[in-house]
Image (tube, rainbow, N blue to C red):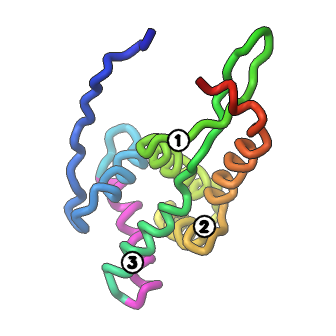
Amino acid sequence: MPRRKKSILKRDIGVDPRYGSAMVQKLINVIMEDGKKNVAREIVYDAIDILIKKAQGDKNKALDLFYKGFEQLIPLVEVRPRRVGGSVYQIPMEVQQDRGRALAMRWLIESASARSDKTMGIRLAYELLEAVEGRGGAVKKKLDVHRMAESNRAFSHFAW
């Protein structure tokens, strides 16, 4: 029996004031700690400013870099534990779009935090640039999740 109602209303978070992007606004909200939204905005906007410098001053190219790097991080499959008989199997399942984005943001922030650059804005920018190239900690995390799902493909018949 479901634990939630069937119709869960998603709250509209709006768009960020500088770029008019809902994705940038969502990243700001995920980075925000203790309600300090201006600090989170500063971090994300610093990262995008670095992307603008890399794109020779073109805002549209920088936002394309941002979106392209972010899209590289969204997983397609993940493993979910399921108890069958007396044992627990890791069953590969498709990731819904909203969950995929949430995982990608979480992985991006975790791997940016683990970097050794000076400020979080610089770390975030370089993590996004590496994601565009298919490198970096967040891309490695995505590939690990995909590899785990591939190795447990034999248990996919338990997904019902």
Relative to 133, residue 28 above or below: above
- Residue at numbered disc 1: 95
- Residue at numbered disc 2: 117
Residue 88 picture quarter = top right
Q: Determine the secondary structure under disc 1.
A: loop
Image spot of residue 127 (x, y percent)? 57, 65
Q: Amino acid at mark 3?
A: Ala
Residue 55 on the magenta segment: yes
Label located before the other in sequence (3 or 2): 3
Residue 41 on the magenta segment: yes
Left or right of 89 in this view: 62 = left
Give the crowd class for mark 1: few <14, some 14-19, many >=20 residues within 10 Å: some
Instruction: State the quadrant of the C terminus.
Output: top right
Left or right of 19 in this view: 133 = right
Front one among 42 and 21: 21
- Residue drawn at 55 percent across, 57 percent down: 73
Front one among 56 and 135: 135
Q: Nearer the viewer, mark 1 or mark 2?
A: 1
Relative to 83, residue 62 above or below: below
**Region in magenta:** 38-56
Rounded to the nearest angstrom, the CA distance separating label 3 from label 1 is 27 Å
Main structural element of the magenta stretch: helix, strand or loop? helix
- Residue at numbered disc 3: 62
Q: Amino acid at mark 2?
A: Asp
Image spot of residue 128 (x, y percent)? 52, 67
Image spot of residue 49 (x, y percent)? 38, 75
Image spot of residue 89 (x, y percent)? 75, 24
Q: Determine the secondary structure under disc 2.
A: loop
Q: Amino acid at mark 1?
A: Val
- Residue drawn at 23 percent across, 67 percent down: 18
Give the crowd class for mark 2: few <14, some 14-19, many >=20 residues within 10 Å: few
